[in-house]
Image (spheres, grey):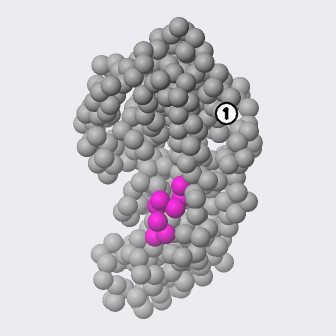
Amino acid sequence: MAADRKAAIRARALALGFDAVGFAAADLSDQARRNLAAYLAKGYHGDMGWLAGTAARRGNPRVLWPAARSVVVLGLNYTPRSEPLRRLDRRGRGNISVYARNRDYHDLLKGRLKTLAGWMHGTLGAEVKVFVDTAPVMEKPLAEAAGVGWQGKHSNLVSRAWGSWLFLGEVFTDIALAPDAAESDHCGRCRACLDVCPTDAFPAPYRLDARRCISYLTIEYKGHIAREFRAAMGNRIYGCDDCLAVCPWNKFAEPTRESGLLPRAELDAPRLADLARLDEAAFRQVFAGSPVKRTGRDRFVRNVLIALGNCGDPAQARTAEALLDDPSPLVRAMAVWALARLAPEATFAAARAARLAQEADTAVREEWQRGAD
């Protein structure tokens, strides 16, 4: 009977459009909890205080829901149709992470999870709860225990079928389902993901220091991005796919079939100059329904100005100059930095003389004083 229930759940999940299905006990290994504790102790989570604040629930699914006995782990393939790293050479265009070029995948995934959970409740009498990565669930260790994939050296999940391109979601249930065989590590001696990182964010294999990660810096980090990372960011304005894109296991993946995950034309290599001109209302309109919206206009334009400063086109100095009086210090600071890299020295010096004395923000004043050094 238990085997029949597993087969039925798997068949239903695949019929709903999920690409990977696995079953795990509602538990995590002691090693997974030790890894989380070590990660937090080293401060690798940066300003993401919610990771530390939810550590107890994150490290034990039954703390999150005491009635849970099993976890159904679901994967949705989002493999891009074109090589994502090719966009890095288009320096006047913004590079948005593959997962964020269309609608927010959380909405797509949660809707499908709820449909599966509702079917499990109505057909099998199971009590259920659904989770995506906005909840304090250690998805990748659970996916590994469920046989969906393993945590690669870039710390993300790798699947033999889908490479590094799987969105994950879970259905917790109170019914006992035999766990699938856990997946083993198939990274071998490969270190492509570690070597490609533009900011050296991996202190060791399987260890990510978010404080150096472009995805963290462009999405999560709320402050002024340190100078040591700006040139390495290139034209990456929201997230970074480098370590995912170079994984050799991607050669087995097929491009996603989900229309909601295909890139919208206006988010597929958009012009940096156009993005820099977005005010709050325009930003919200362009990124309605997109995960990019969560960064807010100011942080996003901060990222765009860094990319603009890296574009190498002196004609774009005027775009940066137009934002020197922006209400946001985040934006003003990066407008100064971009102008210093793009404009002739005399032009920058004149702008500095006109604005430095009246600038109240310490970080922006520092950018004026340091220029392009």
On screen, residue 256 versus residue 368, left or right, reads right
> Dot 1: what SS?
loop
On screen, residue 149 versus residue 259, left or right, reads left
Does 119 appear above or below 259? above
On screen, residue 286 versus residue 132, left or right, reads right
Residue drawn at point x = 64 percent, y = 73 percent:
274
Residue 144 on image: x %, y %: 48, 21
Does 163 appear above or below 357? above
Magenta residues, dominant SS class = helix
Picture quadrant of residue 32: top left
Picture quadrant of residue 238: bottom right
Does 251 appear above or below 196? above
Residue drawn at point x = 56 percent, y = 30 percent:
119
Task: Give the camera-side residue of 119 and 357.
Answer: 119
Numbered range of the magenta stretch? 291-298
Task: Give the camera-side residue of 343 and 333.
Answer: 333
Residue 201 on image: x %, y %: 44, 41
Residue 152 on image: x %, y %: 51, 27
Q: Is residue 189 visible?
A: no
Task: Give the camera-side residue of 231 and 284.
Answer: 284
Looking at this rendering, what residue extends furthest in the bottom direction? 354
Residue 329 on image: x %, y %: 38, 75
Whether 293 is among the magenta residues is yes
Does 195 appear above or below 174? below
Residue drawn at point x = 39 percent, y = 34 percent:
137
Residue drawn at point x = 56 percent, y = 71 percent:
283
Q: Is residue 76 visible?
A: yes
Q: Which residue is mark 1?
A: 17
Residue type at mark 1 is Gly
On screen, residue 15 versus residue 359, left or right, reads right
Quadrant including the C terminus: bottom left
Determine crowd level at label 1: few under 14, some 14-19, many 20+ residues with C-alpha closer than 10 A. Answer: some
